[in-house]
Structures are given as structure tokens and as C-alpha cells.
Amino acid sequence: MSGFESITSRSVALPIANIDTDQIIPARYLTTTTRAGLGQHAFQDWRWLADGSPNPNFALNRAENAGAQILIAGDNFGCGSSREHAPWALLDAGIRAVISTAIADIFRNNALKNGLLAIVVSPTEHASLLEGAGEAITIDLHTQQIRRAGHAPIAFAINAFARQCLLDGVDELGYLLARTDAITRFEGART
């Protein structure tokens, strides 16, 4: 997992409420324990037509959204089951951050643990971001702000531990392993 300090990317809007984890990555693709290749199945049933060709009406398939790394999603994003494959699929598809008015707790925790920044903003801020979909947005994890030209910065909250792990580019185990010497010293002092 690479560190996440800031990202500047065009945004892509998917303003559908209640997008659940089965819509993000259908259950039929949960047979793997690796992340590689899951991105091609992200939003599988919306992204591809019955004949296997790309659905030209789906936001992520439009040429102007190619390479966009910031997804502005509808309310209650990531609801449903607790599948960790959902953030894996989004990351493998090139999405580094999801912004919504509400993100399901389990999805948000899985996302943050895997390097996908999940941000909750107010309905007013969300409406403004949707209105400017396609514009470049900068998300700065140090300042905890979303910035874009011509608009006031939007502050966002994030758990301090999750923020540090994202900045360091590590998961919880990696965080602990990086502190092995200090843990050993502490344990040695206790005996």
C-alpha cells in the first residue's frame, strides 16, 4: 500500500443512493483472496452490457472520466455486506478516494484499512462537489481538506490512527511492525 498524502484528480460523479457492496463488486467475484484484477469487475452489472461491451451510459466508462481517481458517490455508499473486496475493487480500478454524505461504517473501516480514503461531507458540500464533477479536486490528508479552484476548502474528519496509517502507507500490522524496537524495549522494561 502506498502512502496517501494528497491527491489531485478530476472527479467522477455516481450520485446513486444506497450503492451496496454487491453493486460495487458482485458476490460471484469473491472467489479470490488477492486484489489484482478485481478492478475490471468494479460495478460489473452497471459497467458492462449483456454482450460484454462497455455501457456507454455508465459514468466510469465515459472518455472524459478516464483516469479519474476521486468518486463522488450518492448517500449511504458501501452499505450491505462487509466484503473487503469492495474497496479492493475500487482501488484496483484506480479510485483512491470516495466522497459521500454517508458511508457505511464497515465499508469505511475496510476502505481506510486498505488505503482507500472514504470522506463524509455535508449535503450542501456534496451538492457543490456534484455540480463541479469533472473538475480537478485536491484532497490533502495533512490538512484534512478538499480544495478546488474558486471554492472555499471543505474540511473533513478522519480517525487519527487511520489518517496516520494512510500517510505512512501501512495497514494496522505494518504500523505495529514499524514499531517493533519500541515494543521490544517496552516489554523488556516490564520484566
Image (cartoon, rainbow, N blue to C red):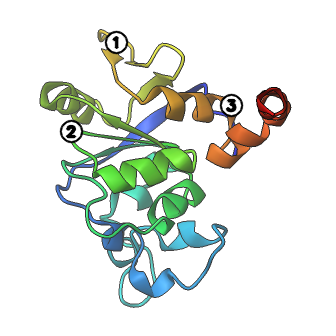
Classify 126 as above or below 153: below
Q: Does any portion of residue 156 appear in the rendered image?
A: yes
Q: Amino acid at mark 1?
A: Pro
Residue at point 20%, 51% (across, down): 76
Which mark is drawn over residue 153? 1
Distance between the Cα atoms at labels 2 and 1?
Answer: 16 Å
Q: Earlier in the sequence, mark 2 or mark 1?
A: 2
Q: Position of residue 186 (x, y in %)?
A: 77, 28
How crowded is the residue under tag 3: few (<14 C-alpha within 10 Å), some, or many (20+)?
A: some
Mark 1 Cα within 10 Å, few/some/many (few <14, many 20+)?
some
Provide the residue designation for mark 2.
101
Q: Secondary structure at mark 2?
A: loop
Camera-nearest label, 3 or 1: 3
Q: Callout 2 environment at 10 Å: few (<14), some (14 to 19), or many (20+)?
A: many
x and y percent of residue 70 in the render?
44, 40
Tell me: 144 left or right of 39.
Answer: left
- Residue 164's image quarter? top right
Query: 148 and 61: which one is in front?
Result: 148
Q: Secondary structure at mark 1?
A: loop
In percent of the image, x 42 and y 72: which residue is there? Answer: 25
Vertical relation: 159 (above or below) 19: above
Regarding mark 3 in the picture, which secondary structure is present there?
Answer: helix
Say which quadrant the C terminus sits in: top right
Name, please, the residue furthest toward the front: 191
| Residue in the foreground of this view, choosing between 13 and 117 | 117
